Image (spheres, helix red, strand yellow):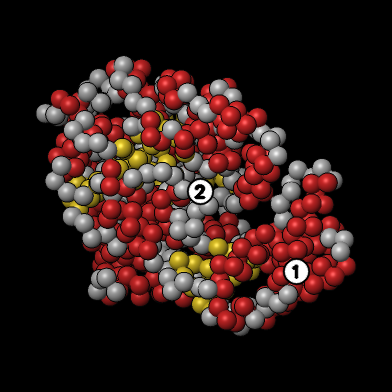
Amino acid sequence: MVNAKVSRYLPYGDWRPLQARIADFIYDKLGEGRGIIVEAPTGVGKTAAALAAALAYSEGEPVKIVYMIRTNNQAAVPMREISRLFKIKGVFIPYVLIRNRARMCCISSTSRLPYRDFLMECNYLKRTGQCSYHVKLRESGVDGSLFMDTVAGLESPADYVKSVCKLGVCPYDASRMLIGNAKVVVLSYYYLFSLNAPEVVNLDLKSSILIIDEAHNLPYAILDLNTQYLTESMVKAATSDVRKFVEDINIKAGALRALASLRALFKDLFADLGEQSEKRIDSSKVLEYFNDVEYLDEALDEVLMAKRSRGILLAGSALSDIIDFYRSIIKMPKDKALFLSMSSEGRAVVSRLMDPSVAASVVMNNAHGFIAMSGTMPPTRLFTSLLGVNVKVSELRIGLMEYIKPSNVKAAIYGEVTTKYTERDEEQYGRIAQTLMDIYDAVRHSVLAVFPSYDTLKATRKYIRRDVDLVVEIGTTTIDEVLASMKVNPHKLILAVAGGKLVEGIEFRLNDVNYIDVVAIVGVPYPEPNDFMNGLVDVVKSRANYDDAWHAVYTWNALVKVKQAIGRGLRSDKDRVFIVFMDYRFKDNPMIWHEISKYLPDIKLPPNEGELIKMIREFSARS
């Protein structure tokens, strides 16, 4: 039986059994220790349970609840529960939402700019008094009670922004001003885990309970938040700006010399990169190419003035990014390192944080408490080692099969294909494609094929028949586009990348029906070994043994992506899906096999593709 205080904050009529178990656990452990880890499948109701337990606990403690999100879209999840609590039970919880400033802007034309250019435009409009929302907030402030009444009952970030805009004030700045009035703050990771965030929020960690959603992402999200780039395309864009907009002959000549030196950087340093995607390099070798940097500052001023005078809305310049990158590496802190990087977007010099604990430990060890929750949490010892957490941590883990009926999920390992690097060739890609097409032909709805990388996806795609209704994840793919396409024809072969936008945080659901019949995990999605990943192993090794460090960085990185892929087919206890592990290494690697067989008992080992397709047809026929 759930504590009555906790039940008061449940925005539904009754507790589901597993949800009640989570709420009880969190409420009890908040009073005992500092850290809580909850692993439970999607659909169990983790968000409502965590909020209810934390709100009940806060009745006896002067604490604020900070619900932390990784992506902007995830803000709708806690908003929905707070809204339902108000609408269904009449319990009013004052809250504020703080996320990407551009996503909270009332001026639609400005909010569509690239983020760096948006910030420049935003600062210009505020400085010159041309943003009426900023002017009103500065001159009249904001009525906290009216604000909280306005956002109560809203269920989406878009409605939140729209409603606050109608009050005539900037939603972003008004929300920051009213943190003190809020019981719950919905906040993106950025504001607590970015070491050089230009804007901070006024939160007392010792009086805050952090609910960290999708916490399996936290270590790598922190590394991404603290990464800076110098790309070849930046240098080209900056060169174009200088040639077009700088009038002063001396400044123009000096800036072009500086940019020519940076173009030489990419030609010289990348010549011997080889096949590595990330190669560590000493900062002194990069700084050798930053000549005449003072001219870039002067050129930036001229470029911005010229663009503004010509009425160009996109008033930013890549010169700004180049200057920022230079300043960040003049005195490279010991926790950061430089890498030469090759990606789908071209060549880049990347400044990377090497230890996520530098940002995480201060936050998580000093908070009143934290609740890290996900459907795919790594082992606690690995999670805490990566993040440098040294407070007492309690954990609750609810297995997938405690939630899903065994008859609703079947799994098989098909070992006749692999994406192992040493065995990749055109014949292998052709066999993978043929198996995926045979699976596609055997089902009524969609097949989600998840690849370890874009390279393996592209290499396989060329062997797919033209009559297959194909969706391919690329950089510009949007979730809305995919769902709209599925409405027209739900029988598709979806080619996605492990850890990508079509495998994390998306539901392939139409009219409350999940249209994924099969999830095919094509290869074990290990990160590619390179200087950065190996450096991360060395960092974690200083807090754990070598095996744990390697598994934290490589094995569990892959396993979390595997579990996330499986979760696309099981979004509720009513969904049915067939899982195909397409690589013999799922069986041959002892740790991988141990974990997936514990997650999905009774995994079959069909001797050939014919038996695999027969199993899929029989399973689909019963749906």
Question: Could you classify mark 2 by the number of other residues whose Cα lies within 10 Å: few (under 14), some (14-19), or many (20 or more)?
Answer: few
Q: Residue at x 33, y 32 (%)?
A: 183
Q: Amino acid at mark 2?
A: Glu
Distance from Cα at disc 1 to Cα at disc 2: 28 Å
Q: Residue 118: x percent and y percent? A: 65, 45
SS assignment at label 2 = loop
Q: Secondary structure at mark 1?
A: helix
Q: Residue at x 32, y 47 (%)?
A: 205
Read off the residue under disc 1.
295
421 vs 497, nearest the viewer:
497
Q: Position of residue 589 (x, y in %)?
A: 30, 68
For the point 37% across and 63% down, the residue is: 358
Quadrant the N terminus occupies: top left
**Residue 444 at x, y = what percent?**
46, 36
Q: In this rendered view, identify the residue nearer to me: 397 or 394.
A: 394
Identify the disc placed on residue 199: 2
Q: Local crowd at mark 1 within 10 Å, few (<14), some, or many (≥20)?
A: some
Chain-order first, disc 1 or disc 2: 2
Q: Is residue 487 above or below residue 250?
A: above
Compared to 571, does 190 lie above or below?
below
Q: Residue furthest left?
A: 1
Q: Quadrant of the C terminus?
A: top left
Depicted 499 relative to depicted 79: above or below: below
The answer to whether residue 114 is seen in the rendering is: no
